[in-house]
Image: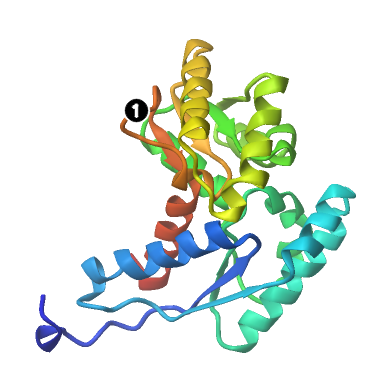
Amino acid sequence: MAWADRKESPLTRHIGIVACSAEGAALCYRTICTEAPSRLGCFAHPEVSLHTHDFAEYMRRIDAGDWPGVAELMLDSAGKLAAVGADLLICPDNTIHQAMPRVTPSSPAPWLHIAEEVVRAAREDGRRRLAVLGTRYLMDGPVYREAAAAAGLEIAVPDAPRREEIHRIIFEECIAGRFLPDSRAFLNEVIAAMRAEGCDAAVLGCTELPLLADAATAALPLLDSTRLLARAALREAIGD
């Protein structure tokens, strides 16, 4: 559709992105803006605002197990986004969703929950046992265990050495925008091992992992948490 032929965009809700690390937040933002035109018309997308605190401050609190402190940062971002008109909030970071029970009761705007959106997509696709890949905090934590249990699904995580290597790849490479062939091959090896353990899909539960994973060579269908969250926010924003 040419720009001159574009129809006036329908009324949409303002999406607020509570960001944490840059690569995942950028992918989420790009997904909203690049996929919206197929529904709204040439160049059209909902209003989007993004706020993030210093990533080092997030990591200081995460490493200390200070989830109330993480929630404090998330709520401060939420307040700033609501103040500029955000109607709907999302966080393209799986790990800090561990703080979400402390966030939503005091939030100035409603949230979509990344793990709930991933699990919803898995159920709709008929999946039953999900391999969850992400940071050490996520794979060892409750975020996907709780979301999957509520939906009647099972999850599994890699063994300890593989968990540590995935964690290293995320923090030493992906967060810095480095996506290396050897790391991509390792991720494929992990996914193949999880298939052998009875998993029928793999959750890319770090929002940078979709930039590393290769769906064409992976042994399992991939559940891209970043894009699934972005698409859910887009549907919500346009009332689809």
* Quarter of image, res 43: bottom left
Label 1 residue SS: loop
Residue 101's place in the image compared with 55, above or below, is: above
| Residue 149 image position (x, y, % from top left) | 62, 32
**Image quarter in which the C terminus is found:** bottom left
Residue at the image point whose x is 28% and y is 82% from the top: 10
Residue 68's place in the image compared with 54, above or below, is: above
* Quarter of image, res 126: top left
Q: Is residue 186 left or right of residue 166?
A: left
Looking at the picture, the colour scheme in use is rainbow
Look at the image and tell me whether residue 184 can be seen. Answer: yes
Task: From the viewer's side, name the closer residue of 170 and 74.
Answer: 170
Task: From the viewer's side, name the closer residue of 172 and 52.
Answer: 172
How many labels, in total? 1
Q: Amino acid at mark 1?
A: Thr
Q: Which residue is mark 1?
A: 217
Residue at the image point whose x is 64% and y is 88% from the top: 83
Q: Residues within 10 Å of mark 1 (few under 14, many from 20)?
A: few
* Quarter of image, res 31: bottom left
Residue 223's place in the image compared with 87, above or below, is: above
Task: From the viewer's side, name the closer residue of 100 and 182.
Answer: 182
Q: Is residue 71 left or right of residue 153?
A: right
| Residue 202 image position (x, y, % from top left) | 48, 30
**Image quarter in which the N terminus is found:** bottom left
Residue at the image point whose x is 72% and y is 63% from the top: 55
Look at the image and tell me whether residue 146 can be seen. Answer: no
Residue at the image point whose x is 86% and y is 62% from the top: 69
Residue 58's place in the image compared with 146, above or below, is: below
| Residue 158 image position (x, y, % from top left) | 63, 22
As drawn, which residue projects farthest toward the top? Answer: 196
| Residue 12 image position (x, y, % from top left) | 38, 79
